[in-house]
Amino acid sequence: METLGISFIESDDDMSIEAIMSVTQSMTQTMGILHGGATISLAESVAGVGSNALCAADERCFGMQISASHISSAEVGDTIRAIGKIQHKGRSTHVWNVDVVSESTGKLISTIRVTNAVVKQVVYFKKNS
């Protein structure tokens, strides 16, 4: 997240989460617009942080499946906002819908569904010889 410059927006709503990311030249594809992989990384980060915030102390979440539809584009210098809303909060999975929009145009850039696996945190102990 640090490499992409993702910044989270504070909120009291534990059923949604938001983050922003500035589009830089290093995030573009061959035609000079935002690469879909960077957009997906933003969405997966939002859903991952959201799921881990909802987990019990002995649980962790990991990305399991992601599906993205890219609707329009963003250019270098634009800032995009990811708005994640939890759709399903189960014992073993969380499902999030994440909409990514351009801050400058208000256009929907991508809509992304992320499924996270909820697993118990495993603590390993070293055996004494």
Image: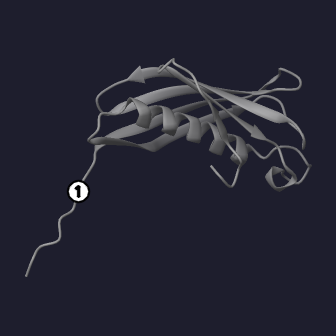
Q: Residue at x 87, y 36 (%)?
A: 78
Report the residue that reaches farthest toward the bottom: 129
Which amino acid is tagged 1?
Answer: Val
Element type where label 1 sits in the image: loop
Position of 37 compared to 67: left or right? right
Where residue 7 sits in the image (x, y, percent)?
A: 67, 39
Residue highlighted by disc 1: 123
Position of 128 compared to 78: left or right? left
- Image position of 53 with respect to 88: above or below: below
User: Front-most of 106 and 19?
Assistant: 19
Q: Determine crowd level at label 1: few under 14, some 14-19, many 20+ residues with C-alpha closer than 10 A.
A: few
Q: Residue at x 51, y 27 (%)?
A: 96
Colour scheme of the picture: one colour
- Image position of 100 with respect to 37: above or below: above
Where residue 121 sits in the image (x, y, percent)?
A: 27, 48
Q: Residue at x 7, y 82 (%)?
A: 129
The image quarter containing residue 53 is: top left
Position of 96 compared to 122: left or right? right
Where residue 68 sits in the image (x, y, percent)?
A: 64, 35
The image quarter containing residue 41 is: top right
User: Front-most of 71 and 74?
Assistant: 74
Report the residue that reaches farthest toward the left: 129
- Image position of 46 with respect to 76: above or below: above
Q: Residue at x 68, y 55 (%)?
A: 3
Position of 97 compared to 115: left or right? right
Tell how many labels.
1
- Image position of 47 with respect to 86: above or below: below
